[in-house]
Image (tube, helix red, strand yellow):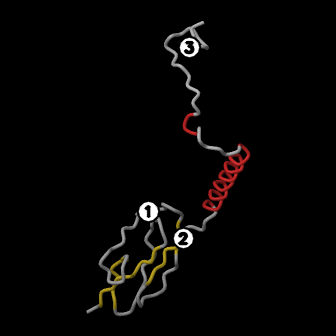
């Protein structure tokens, strides 16, 4: 038997070093590690269950003086769909925006990733 390779006669097998490796200075009982691993798994299961039971994200519509538009609920990454247009006497509805000043128009079909409030944009009739 070759003393350099104690478990084989194959000279291509690397020698096994038993210096303790990466965790040689770690002194944690196996029971503590087991408790940490089980606790982590329980936490992951809890987070997965609570995340799957979420009501999703609310998208609210501020008609800025127009008729009410019902809030909609979306799941994470669902595409945003355009609601029914509000009405307002003396004004023409021009679309929805992400800001009150109507400088950032909404792109319907984009994925919903958070709670949103959209603002109606109006043009006064002449």
Q: Is residue 29 above or below residue 79?
A: above
Residue at image mark 2: 73
Nearest the camera: 54 or 16?
16
Q: Secondary structure at mark 2?
A: strand
Residue at image mark 3: 5
Disc nearest the viewer among 2 and 3: 3
Asked whether disc 2 touches disc 1, contact meaning CB atoms under 8 Å apart, the reply is no
Name the spot of residue 46 as percent of width and height, x first: 67, 58
Question: Which residue is situated farthest in the top direction here?
Answer: 1
Callout 1 environment at 10 Å: few (<14), some (14 to 19), or many (20+)? some
- Between discs 2 and 1, the one toward the N terminus: 2
Residue at image mark 1: 111
Left or right, 94 with reference to 29:
left
| Residue at 59% over, 33% down | 20
Disc nearest the viewer among 3 and 1: 3
Question: Which residue is situated farthest in the left direction here?
Answer: 126
Name the spot of residue 82 as percent of width and height, x first: 43, 71
Callout 2 environment at 10 Å: few (<14), some (14 to 19), or many (20+)? some
């Amino acid at each position: 038997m070759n003393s350099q390779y104690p478990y084989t006669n194959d000279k291509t097998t690397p020698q096994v070093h038993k210096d303790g490796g990466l965790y040689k200075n770690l002194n944690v009982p196996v029971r503590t590690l087991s408790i940490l691993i089980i606790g982590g798994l329980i936490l992951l299961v809890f987070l997965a269950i609570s995340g799957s039971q979420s009501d999703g994200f609310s998208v609210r519509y501020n008609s800025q003086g127009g008729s009410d538009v019902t809030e909609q609920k979306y799941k994470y990454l669902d595409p945003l769909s355009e609601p029914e247009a509000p009405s307002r006497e003396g004004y023409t509805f021009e679309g929805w925006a992400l800001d009150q000043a109507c400088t950032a128009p909404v792109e319907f079909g984009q994925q919903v990733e958070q709670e949103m409030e959209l603002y109606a944009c109006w043009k006064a009739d002449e």
